Amino acid sequence: MEKFFQFKERNTSYKKETLAGLTTFLSMAYILVVNPMILSQSGMDKGAVFTATALSAIVGSLLIGLLANYPVGIAPSMGLNSFFTFSVCMGMGIQWQVALTGVFIASIIFVILSLMKIREKIINVIPEDLKHAIAAGIGFFVAFIGLKNAGIIVSNPDTAVGIGDLTSPLTGLAVLGFVLSFILMTMGVHAGIFIGMVITTIIGMIFGLIDIPNAVVGTIPSLEPTFGVVFSHLDEIFSPNVLAVIFIFLFVAFFDTAGALIAVASQAGLLKNNQIPNAGRALLADSTSGVVGAVLGTSTTASMVESSAGVAVGGRTGFTSIVISICFALSLFFSPILSVIIPEVTAPAIIIVGALMAMEMGKINWTRLEVVVPSFVTIIMMPLTASVATGIALGFILYPLALVAQKRHKEIHPIMYILCLLFLAYFIFV
């Protein structure tokens, strides 16, 4: 087992990997609650979506661990489930069964692109400075999400965002968890983030801020309402609206996953010669879980940026992903316990992870304007637009333009020019 996962080469152990898997699971377990809540607003059965969410996470995390040896958790993407419900089903008036079929088709296309190594090629030709910018940008985005979940940052009609009510008990709990985790980490405690989450949860229950579960074991909801519905709506995928939906799912999921993989690989020190080892296998695992998820009954899956929480406590191999998969399997039976994992508990971990990922900024060449502006735009637009894909797209447009202006066009791979044009078309027409 140690030889298969390369423990010695990556300087890790069963203890570190197990702790990393538990930490990542706790950081992303909210998806088991939030995904059914969002997709049920499109008309889908909440119980069936819960089971489909867990099963797709089990399959995806297991595959990426075994095939690619990556410490990454895979689960339905938060941004894409909102797009599925509010833009496609509610906004465009498309039935959830048809929208789910669009997810299914997009995932199959992903599998084909992964097998042909087209996705891997695109990721590997991204300039090194932009790779670091993507990782740092995701760090700021993740930290912003954590600050919002904690109630530290709230919306403000005058300034867009502002400071929240720090005297609120739940916000105070999140602040306490952040300070505690930060102190433990500065003391050199590798499990600082995980211990901080556990202590915060216990304190929350003691003071009545977190409900104590009424039960420990629950029944597994049936998949019958959603399982296999995609196969009965394949004849509707050629309508203009559905084709547009498939394209957008492809576009956003592609670069959300690419961004997450780049960020995690960079943070874990796995990047070699500006390339991600086994990227093709990682992408195949990701796209395969998308196909499985659509058949079971959930929106597009993706590599989760919360995986960085596990990397921060020492996760370096696919054994971390195996632990994540096991945790999701257990969650099917212990769903009542999930109620204690509230946003204020996971927020401190997400904020700290964001700070660690932002350290990638130090690797960017800030002395050259043609690098500075595309990198800065990539970083700043991720949190401001709440979209990893948008930040990447804008950086990919500006970087080739800058080098062309300097008559250095031969230094850019032709694929980058193609992506530049595709992103321009996306912003103009979509």
Image (spheres, helix red, strand yellow):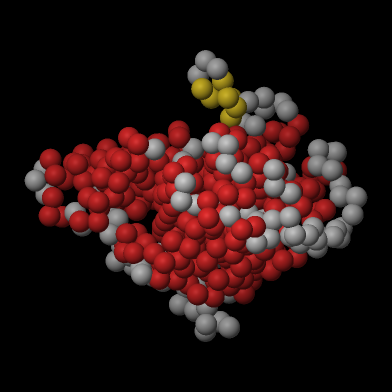
Q: If the image is split into quadrants, where does the N terminus sit? A: bottom right
Q: With respect to residue 386, does 46 lie above or below?
A: below
Residue furthest out toward the left: 407
Q: Return the x and y of residue 324 as percentages of the image width and height.
A: 64, 64
Q: Residue at x 47, y 56 (%)?
A: 106
Answer left or right for 318 relative to 127. right
Q: Return the x and y of residue 43 as percentages of the image width and height.
A: 69, 43
Answer left or right for 15 relative to 335. left
Answer left or right for 338 relative to 139. right
Q: With respect to residue 137, does 19 lie above or below?
A: below
Residue furthest out toward the right: 214
Q: Residue at x 55, y 71 (%)?
A: 63
Q: With respect to residue 111, does 251 lie above or below?
A: above
Q: Nearer the viewer, residue 123 or 36?
A: 36
Q: Residue at x 61, y 44 (%)?
A: 95
Q: If the image is split into quadrants, where does the C terminus sit? A: top left
Residue furthest out toward the top: 158
Q: Residue at x 30, y 41 (%)?
A: 425
Q: Nearer the viewer, residue 272 or 202?
A: 272
Q: Return the x and y of residue 5 as percentages of the image width and height.
A: 52, 78
Quadrant housing residue 48: bottom right
Q: How many marks?
A: 0
Q: With respect to residue 161, does 43 lie above or below?
A: below
Quadrant housing residue 397: top left
**Is residue 309 shown to the viewer in this render?**
no
Q: Return the x and y of residue 292 as percentages of the image width and height.
A: 59, 64
